[in-house]
Amino acid sequence: MQARIIMLVDLDYFFAQIEEKRNPALKDKPVVVCVYSGRTKDSGAVSTANYVARKYGVKSGIPISLAKTKLKDVDAVFLPVDKEYYSKVSEKIMNILRGYADIFEQVSVDEAYLDVSQKTRGSYLDASELAARIKDDVFNQQKLTCSIGVGPNKLVAKIAADYQKPDGLTVVKPEYVLRFLSPLPVRRLVGVGRKTEQRLETLGVKTIAQLARFDIQKLVDVFGRNLAAYFHNASLGIDEDPVEERGEPESLSKISTLKEDTNDITKILPVAYHLCEEVHKKLTQRQLVCRSVSIYVVASDLGMHSRSKTFENPTSDLQLFKDTVKELFEKFLAETDLQARRVGVKVSNLDKKEAMQKQLTSFFGG
Ligand code: DCP
Ligand code: CA
Ligand code: CA
């Protein structure tokens, strides 16, 4: 398989930048976009601030009153959020970005991953040129700047995008990933919040390089297997999470290679159950339910086999997935004498969870 090239595009000080563009008189002044709670005149939190205001220590999440104190001696502008308008701008930008991607995944109002592996034929030179074109195109059409990170996976692309802001472009080729990550604080890794940062610090781990060298067994003791494995891989710049179009996928699946070819159900099931958990996580993250569950087997002769079951009602019940997958594997193994090399789990016939709830409510007349 060809190596991937992934971009993360993130708009700079998004809500505040939109406000600046809407009213050029704001340019060069500290601009603070606020979510007013309405309780008292200044109660509520800062949604975001432009870079001028950030110099005074104003940032997302702090109380509006605190922002006012920090900016009391300057001619600052405080504005209420206008989510509806920002969403419209966001949609236009996302449509521009989508056109540049082989696979496109919007992750928030101002952020998207672009898989450009095919388009660039794996060339980082092409990818840098493409990123520069994207920045120009967004600026010409919407007069907004963004920062782009380019790398071999989502993890690296995301950290690269944050590396030089605003109006940045950071390209990290695979051979530079370790050198790029090593000196950075662990906090830069997605999933490392303030608490985790503190826990790591008590272990003597501050930088990503220190995390990479840290004894994995000790990490497991502190954070459990899943998180420890994630941290360890992340510190080495390893991340296989695919860029996936959101919205309404047709199906969600995960596949995994077994340690050895086997037709022993006791060896297959733990792997299959783990895949169920991963697929279940994807399903619930997207707030979806499914009506069908399938298993896949790539046999030692490399033939692909599958078995499916469809339920009467849409569901996202993990235990039901596991039981169904067990049943399907038992059936499959009883019917063939193939050795499994890789096994997969897929859910399909997807629907929005709300749709299920609506159906239920109308069914029960509630
Ligand atoms: N936002 C918010 N509350 C937060 C964080 C963000 O309302 N605690 C909103 C306002 C931001 C937008 O989401 O403009 C995008 O968030 P980012 O984290 O990407 O931050 P910005 O785009 O504002 O700044 P940066 O230039 O650092 O990306
Ligand atoms: Ca942003
Ligand atoms: Ca963002």
Image: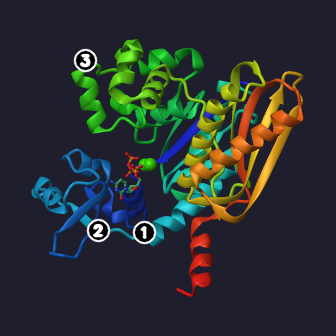
The Cα atoms of the two marked residues, 3 and 2, are separated by 42 Å
Q: Which residue is mark 1?
A: 83
**Of the pair 79 and 211, the residue shown nearer to us:** 211
In the rendered structure, the answer to whether residue 116 lies left or right of residue 17 reads: right
The Cα atoms of the two marked residues, 1 and 2, are separated by 12 Å
- The numbered disc on residue 204 is 3
Q: On screen, 235 above or below 81?
A: above
Q: Which residue is mark 2?
A: 79
State the residue at coordinates (52%, 86%).
366
Identified by mark 3, the residue type is Gly
State the residue at coordinates (53%, 68%).
88
In the rendered structure, the answer to whether residue 188 lies left or right of residue 132 reads: left
The Cα atoms of the two marked residues, 1 and 3, are separated by 42 Å
Give the structural element (helix, strand or loop) at label 1.
Answer: helix
Identified by mark 1, the residue type is Lys
**Of the pair 30 and 338, the residue shown nearer to us:** 338
Q: Kindly report which numbered mark, 3 or 2, lies closer to the viewer in this rendering.
A: 3
| Location of residue 55 in the rendering, given as x and y in whole percent from the top left corner | 22, 44
Q: Kindly report which numbered mark, 1 or 2, lies closer to the viewer in this rendering.
A: 1
Q: Earlier in the sequence, mark 3 or mark 2?
A: 2
Name the residue furthest bottom: 365
Task: Determine crowd level at label 2: few under 14, some 14-19, many 20+ residues with C-alpha closer than 10 A.
Answer: some
Name the residue furthest front: 334
State the residue at coordinates (85%, 21%).
300
Q: Earlier in the sequence, mark 1 or mark 3?
A: 1
